[in-house]
Image (cartoon, rainbow, N blue to C red):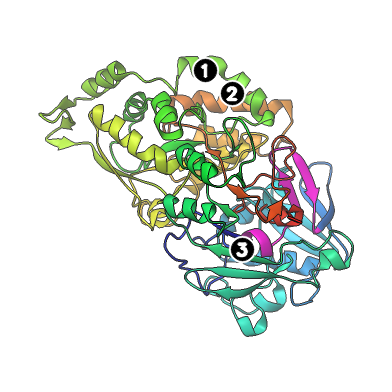
Amino acid sequence: MAGLGGEHPGGFTDVDNFNIWVPGFSRSGYSNFASQPLFYYNMMTDKFINWAGESFEYNSDFTEVAVKIRKGVTWSDGTPFTAKDVAFTINTVIATPTMSLSGDLKRRVKSVTVVDDQNFKVALNNKDPQFVFDTFTFRADVGLHMMPEHVWKGQDAATFKFYDPDKGWPLGIGPYKLVGTTIQQKIWDLDPNWWGAKTGFQPLPKVERLIFLPGMNEITMAQMLVTNEIDMAFSLTPANMKLVQSQNKKIITSRDTPPYGYMDWWPIGLGLNTMKPPFDDKEIRWAISYAIDRDQIVKFAFSGFNEPSALPFPPYPGMKPFFDAVKDLLQQYNTLEYNLNKVNDIMTKKGYKKDAQGMWTKDGKKITFDIITFPQHPSTTPTIPIVTEQLRKAGFDATFSLPADYGSRMRTGEAAAFVWGHGGSMRDPWKSLDLLYHSKYVKPIGTDNLGFNYYRWGNKNLDALIDQMGQLQYNDPKMVDLFRKAMEIWLPELPDPQLVQTVIALPMNSTYWTNWPKYPDYYIHEGFWHRTGYLIAQNLQPVS
């Protein structure tokens, strides 16, 4: 099976580096097929799936969790995967500040105790009923990748590349082994000795080889789909999807009616670096929000197959009580309102005047900024030119660019503005609030924030509410009350103006493979770049 995503456009830059615990890796086989978790979560059906983990149980006050590993799990070199590997992974990540989950685990974990090869206990610093879901569960881009202690022990974890083809590295507990890695492709072959099949836990996948290609422009992707060169590709715009399907009837999507794809966990907004004036002024942020016509974005960027996003959360079933709880607040603070008169009122009150080019100016200076995003993404890339033009018409001297190093610019605070998503929450709002808006993640400009709180914004009162939410189970009624109080702070401040949801209409080629993910009975969503991507290979069947 061959597929390509939207990352590392033109060529992979991590050819010999499989240290996926630090930022910058491509989701090209290791993170989504070779690495597997203790548990999976299906965000489309709200289903929790035990995998390498057989069970877990919290103590009465959620300050400790005991986890049991399934018997017979092994690394791809045959070495048993044990509780020692889990403990080693957690301790290594905590001790390595440049690793993405280092700060999170350091704040949450008091200690890890290995009981025996199959059992371990995690003592937590606070009441933390979300810990297993956040740490040991793969869902979209969330979840801790496990390290083989017998390989990583004694290595410099911050710089170790975890690559040696003679030794079979990288190792994973998934059924695919790396057999080739170049700038142009990464190839993974099925391991017939995979523990899942040997123990009878799961059948061996029918997909014998995975080929990942780097990001390409949409026209190239479309041509490769039409000629059956690839089986999956990153999302296409509605126009290109229609063109591809008219030329190759075997190209399908997960839904046969609009919006044709799945609602991703990643509603997008216009991110503003609040450490860079004038974005430190909430009134300016609201003026920018009033300058944006979301309905126009939906119409022209997505041919109508999308919807505006009022809050930084996906409208999944589990989120409905939270949306319902703030309906009146959203009337008072209408994050979707397009109103150029309000733009003019705010900017005039702040002392700005329009110059001869119609741009807001104060003390001889315009509000000039460049907006960045992915070179290729189904929601951010088509949105960014429309938002930029709308802002210019409203008097903001905005431009946009699609740099290859967009990620590092955002993490270090070099970027002033960016069109970006809000990944985290699926069944309650705590995770997105914590990752994206808690001040504990705010770093000075020039310091890598490891992908958290890109807006460099915080509020201590909001922090306290987020911390209280983190000590509740996702379905605790108190969660809704705390969320409303959080929105009473967040909405007036509006750290980042909201834009639209992310709907991913992903082309899947049924020429050679059947049983692709389909609505409404998703065994998993079709985002193969996510950490749940392996479940697609597990379920595909060859065309007879």
Residue at image mark 3: 29
User: Residue 307 in the image: x percent, y percent?
Assistant: 51, 27
Q: Is residue 84 above or below residue 267?
A: below
Name which of mark 2 and mark 3 comes first in the sequence. Answer: 3
Task: Check the image and name the residue furthest to the bottom.
Answer: 166
Q: Secondary structure at mark 3?
A: loop
Tell me, for residue 109, which label it has, or none. none
Residue located 82% across and 68% down the image? 195
Label 2: which secondary element: helix
- Residue matched to label 1: 329
Span highlighted in magenta in the image:
29-52
| Marks 1 and 2, how far apart at CA | 9 Å
Residue 495 place in picture, x, y as percent: 42, 34
Q: Which residue: 48% across, 37% down?
A: 238
Which amino acid does the dot numbered 1 rest on?
Leu
Please state which of the two labelled residues, at mark 2 or mark 3, is closer to the viewer. Answer: 3
Q: How many marks?
A: 3
User: Can you say whether 184 is above or below 252 in the image?
Assistant: below
Q: Is residue 460 left or right of residue 209?
A: left
Tell me if I can see residue 145 in this picture.
no
- Tell me residue 82's x, y (percent): 80, 68
Please tell me in which quadrant of the rendered image residue 144 appears.
bottom right
- Asked whether disc 1 touches disc 2, contact meaning CB atoms under 8 Å apart, the reply is yes
Residue 67 within the segment the image draws in magenta: no
- The answer for how far apart the CA atoms under marks 2 and 3 are is 40 Å
Circles 3 and 1, Cβ within 8 Å, touching? The answer is: no
Observer-nearest residue: 153 or 334? 334
Q: Which residue is mark 2?
A: 484
Mark found first going from the N terminus, 3 or 1? 3
